[in-house]
Image (cartoon, rainbow, N blue to C red):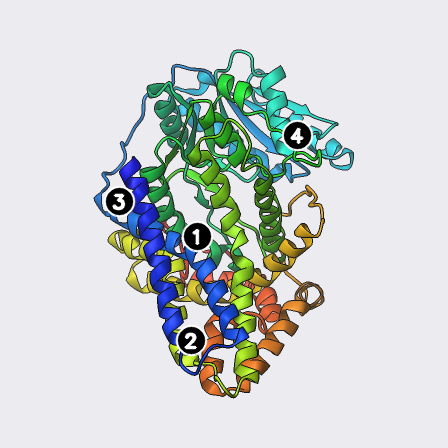
Amino acid sequence: MPYRRALMLCGSLLAAAGLTTLMVRALAPGGWTVAKAAILGSFALASLWVGFCLMQGVAGYVLLLCRKPPPEAYPLPATRIAIAVTVRNEDMDIVLPPLGQLLNALDAVGAGSMFALFVLSDSSDAAASAEEQAVAAFRGNDPSRIHYRRRRNNDRFKAGNIMEFMDQRADGFPLMLILDADSRMSARAVLRLAAEMEANPHLAIVQHLTVGLPATAAFPRLFQFGMRAGMRTWAAALAWWQGDECCYWGHNALIRIAPFRDHARLPLLPDGRPILSHDQVEAALLAGAGWGIRLLPEEDGSFEANPPALPEFMRRELRWLAGNLEYRHLLRMPGLRAMGRWQLVQAILLFGCTPFYLVILLAASFAAATDPVSPFPAIPVLAVMLAWAGAIYAPKLLGYAEACRRIGTYGGMGRFLSGVLAETVFTLLLDAVSVVGKTATTVRLLLGMRPAWLPQNRGDRGVAWSEAARLLWPHTALGVVAFAGFAAAGWGAMLWAVPLAGGLPMAIPFCVLTAKPWFGTWLRRRGIAAIPEEVLSPDPGP
């Protein structure tokens, strides 16, 4: 394991150094200015994360090419397992049916007697009545095995909800399967987790790779298509070099209750607030206490829903950003191992490098518009930025390459390539918008803004032009200003900006279009961005 980690570290640093050297050579002709120095400095700092992404993609791709297929069946568990699903102001008509399907599937393979379901609610008083009625009707099918509890005091958010269950209601259950309201798992995936946990008594968490559910709306459909390819390689690499000190994403995972209860109680932040993003801290505390956290990079049987439209996606990203940036207060927390601290740093870097991307864009626009002495070398810098983009998107691009070995599960090469093209355009537009939103939120957080824990909308919906304009006018205005700067330097500079910032002036129509029901239907009927589950069980829709 030390050699694997050293390889990842050295490879990441070499990639970052190589990219930075290329940028120095691209910017140097004509002399240095403040704008060029800002581009180079931001590029060099961000390249540390970009180099890591490249190594993750390459390592994951090689591992996927060499891996053996997982077993077809797993033994029945010998240990009782509590299935705990956490909810907060959710539509229970969406949450409960998949849970019933999971219980029925476990019964069908003879494992049902080892499982009980607990719905753990943190819902508000306004939502409580409908929720309680829905759960009561659902429990009527199996009241001895289905349980419901609602907290009126939502202390410490989801982490407090889970710990309260462990402290007061988990007697007789050594293991707990933790699910979110949008989680879906097959019986086979659950049994895979149980077999791994029972065969390795030093493990406290076994985390399953989770992929997006088949989606009807255009936004989640395109997003999950790319995310699935990228996460497959990313997870394979993490499991390889992090071993049993791996990451935990807070759901679709099996937990050993006793060590979790003893070691994963979260401290308060320095200002007395509870930690918003709990999962990585819990894993780091458990690893520090000598327990293992293992990731199974298998993509079958474990699912989650993705946000239905851009506004919900942005709210989720900004909530994650706020939670991850809190980790900066915990890096010196006693009792953590080096890998546990890296897990927190990795989570910070996932969002913390974003402002550097925006600085590169704005400094380049300024240089293109204002510097006649040392003109902006648009074409050389574009070549470097394309290499940079190839590195940061390497997990996804190599995930697509690996998926070609199973092209039939994606509906054939034509459909697959059309999905890759559509998703690439989608991602370039989305990432430009996302960079501005995350940078603004980072600044507000550093200035003292406190994030809230709000319910989530998970249902498909359209987005009105007025809503998109209210949300995205700053992004649009910034894009217009940036492109005006590039336009002053000619078409070469404009070409430089299109793949990196084209989403900004297009933000409002992009938001509206990707939420249009007809667009999702159009994509689905043509099989564009179809995932294997959709191809194997097609639903042509209306």
For disc 2, the neighbor class at 10 Å (few under 14, some 14 to 19, many from 20) is many
**Disc 2 marks which residue?**
27
Q: Which of marks 3 and 4 is nearer the N terminus?
A: 3
Amino acid on which disc 4 is placed: Ser
Q: Is mark 1 on a helix, strand or loop?
A: helix
Q: Which of marks 3 and 1 is nearer the N terminus?
A: 3
Q: What element carries label 2?
A: helix
Q: Which of marks 4 and 1 is nearer the N terminus?
A: 4
Distance in Å between CA atoms under marks 4 and 2: 56 Å
Q: Do the residues labelled 2 and 1 touch (CB within 8 Å)?
A: no
Label annotation for residue 418: none
Hey, which quadrant is residue 482 in on the image? bottom right
Would residue 442 appear left or right of 255 to someone viewing this image? right
**Disc 3 marks which residue?**
63
Q: Is residue 23 above or below residue 542?
A: below
**Residue 169 appears in the rendering:** yes
In terms of depth relative to the viewer, which is nearer, 30 or 504? 30
Amino acid on which disc 2 is placed: Leu
What x and y, as percent, mark residue 289?
46, 22
Which residue shows up at 56% across the image and 60% down it? Answer: 355
Q: What element carries label 4?
A: strand
Q: Are marks 3 and 1 in contact (CB under 8 Å)?
A: no
